[in-house]
Structure formats: C-alpha cells, structure tokens
C-alpha cells in the first residue's frame, strides 16, 4: 500500500503477515479543485471493512477535504470539481443516479466540534429515524436506547433523556453526536478531529469507543494527534500539500516509514 516519491535507503520491508479485509472504499486517481485551486492530487487508496483508518498531516494538506469527499459533503462548497473515481461498496459515488442523501445515510459524519441540536437528548438521537419515516414510539425508544449504549453514553443520560442536549459536557455532546449518527445504522463513520475540543479524559473515552465500534463499523478519522493515530488506527494515510505521500499499516508508518516526508513529519521535524 506504499505510495510516495522520495524513498529512504533501507532494507527490504518485512513481508506482511496480516490479510486485508474486504474493501469498503476504492479510490483511484482522485483529484479535487476549489475553483482554480487544486486541493487533492491523484489520491489512490483502499479502505478496508471493520477497520480504523487515520488520516494525518499538517494543516491545509487536504485531510478534511478528502474526508468530506467520501460522503460528498464537499459538494456543498461552490465551485468544487473532481476527477477520478471513488467507489463505495463497488458503486461510483459520483454517478448522477446516486442520491447524496442515500450515501450520507450509509456514511455518517462526526465533526470537530460537538453539534447537538437544540432539542432533548432523546430527540437528538431520534431525529434521523424520524426523518426516515419511523413514527412508532416503542421502536424509536429501542433505537435511542441502542444508539446511546453503542456510544457508551446510556448509563450517563438514561435518566435525563428529556433534558436539553446543551446541558451535557463537551465529551458527552460528542458521544451524543456519535449516537445520533449510529441511530440510522450507517456502514461507515467519518470523524473529523472528533477529540480536538475535548479534555484528556473525554478523549480517552472516545478512543475506547472507536475501538469498540470498529467491530460493527468502518471508521475513518482525521487527527492532528499522531499519538492518537498510533493508538487507535489499523491503517494510516499521510497527506502533504494535497498528495497522499504514504498509506500503510499504522505500525509500519510509525516504525519504518518508506518516505522521508513521512519520517520528518512523525518525528516532528516539520508540521
């Protein structure tokens, strides 16, 4: 899976002993422009099922743009154009007959800052199922309970479901946003620096949650925290100036990167 330009002088890499899972995303030669500015260049990579993939790199390197391309949220910006292919479960996400709403139901998103709705805790989680036509109170209760349990929040809020979500702590709000995404039973969960606004204790809880969720979901997480990537990710992609410099198993990226740029970044020589 190595992708890059300048190679370090090194001995031959050890053969991989682990097998790749089934692919959820297959990305080939993806380019993206904001007007006349190119933000992504010839990105080629595969995201495997039931794994955590971290996207690392300095600010402005294209990490969040890439993430938002995977559920086409990037299209909300005027003047965006793309070339190349992004296949989700074998289907080209850019084909005209593929509804963006369908894709975004399958591919949920958790943002950098918690963004609960100005509603009760219950209604935050029930919002998506209601939009999808579920009206039965018992079914909604089951969905809310299940989603809050999956987000490791149920025990903390089970007696507060009618309270406004804004009364939760920052870490609880972020887990509520995860529960809200899980309520519509997505296949993939995109996370854009989900712990950057959280304290260390809340960050640890969210990292533990990510590890638990990957048995049921495919998770792609943008992070500035390289220690976090090393702790939670199975695979890591290093982006620089819109290019995918290197993509490999996380332990390989951090112990024996194939590219000088990757080595310089993870050792703190720039970034």
Image (cartoon, rainbow, N blue to C red):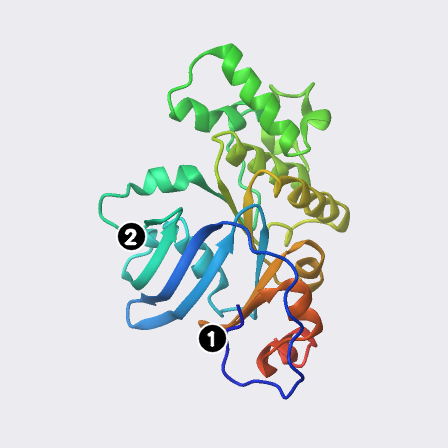
Identify the residue at horizontal 49%, vertical 69% (top origin): 60
| Image location of residue 229, percent across then percent down | 66, 59
Q: Which residue position is annotated with label 1?
A: 241
| Image location of residue 47, percent across then percent down | 50, 55
How packed mark 2 is, by other alpha carbons closer than 10 Å (few <14, some 14-19, many 20 or more), is: some
Q: Which mark is residue 94?
A: 2
Q: Which of the marked residues, 1 or 2, is nearer the chain's N terminus?
A: 2
- Is label 1 in a helix, a strand or a loop? loop
How packed mark 1 is, by other alpha carbons closer than 10 Å (few <14, some 14-19, many 20 or more), is: some
Please, is residue 38 above or below residue 9 in the view? above
The reply to whether dot 1 and dot 2 touch (C-beta < 8 Å) is no
User: Image quarter for residue 14?
Assistant: bottom right
Q: Going by the image, does 170 lie left or right of 131?
A: right
| Image location of residue 153, percent across then percent down | 68, 31
Identify the residue at horizontal 23%, vertical 43% (top origin): 97
Q: Going by the image, does 231 lie left or right of 118?
A: right
- Is label 2 in a helix, a strand or a loop? loop
Looking at the image, how many numbered discs can be counted on the residues? 2
| Image location of residue 10, percent across then percent down | 66, 85
Identify the residue at horizontal 62%, vertical 20% (top origin): 161
User: Image quarter for residue 256?
Assistant: bottom right
Question: Quarter of the image containing the C terminus?
Answer: bottom right
Question: Camera-side residue: 98 or 14?
Answer: 14
Please, is residue 151 above or below residue 223 in the view? above
Nearer mark to the viewer, of 1 and 2: 2
């Amino acid at each position: 899976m190595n992708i890059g330009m300048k190679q370090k002088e090194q001995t031959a890499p050890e053969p991989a002993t682990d097998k790749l899972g089934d692919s959820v995303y297959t990305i080939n030669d993806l380019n993206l422009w904001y007007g006349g500015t190119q933000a992504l260049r010839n990105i080629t990579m595969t995201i495997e099922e039931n794994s955590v993939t971290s996207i690392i790199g300095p600010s402005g390197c294209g990490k969040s743009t890439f993430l938002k391309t995977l559920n086409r949220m990037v299209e909300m910006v005027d003047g965006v154009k793309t070339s190349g292919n992004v296949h989700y479960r074998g289907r080209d996400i850019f084909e005209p007959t593929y509804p963006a709403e369908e894709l975004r139901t399958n591919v949920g998103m958790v943002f950098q800052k918690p963004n609960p709705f100005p509603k009760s805790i219950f209604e935050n989680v029930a919002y998506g199922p209601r939009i999808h036509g579920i009206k039965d109170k018992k079914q909604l209760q089951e969905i809310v309970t299940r989603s809050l349990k999956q987000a490791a929040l149920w025990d903390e809020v089970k007696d507060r479901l009618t309270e406004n979500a804004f009364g939760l702590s920052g870490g609880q709000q972020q887990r509520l946003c995860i529960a809200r995404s899980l309520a519509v039973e997505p296949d993939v969960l995109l996370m854009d620096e989900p712990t950057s606004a959280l304290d260390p204790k809340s960050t640890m809880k969210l990292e533990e949650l990510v590890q638990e969720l990957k048995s049921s979901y495919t998770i792609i997480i943008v992070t500035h925290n390289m220690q976090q990537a090393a702790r939670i990710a199975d695979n890591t992609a290093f982006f620089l100036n819109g290019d995918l410099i290197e993509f490999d198993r996380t332990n390989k990226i951090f112990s024996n990167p194939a590219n000088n740029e990757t080595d310089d970044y993870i050792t703190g020589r720039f970034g």
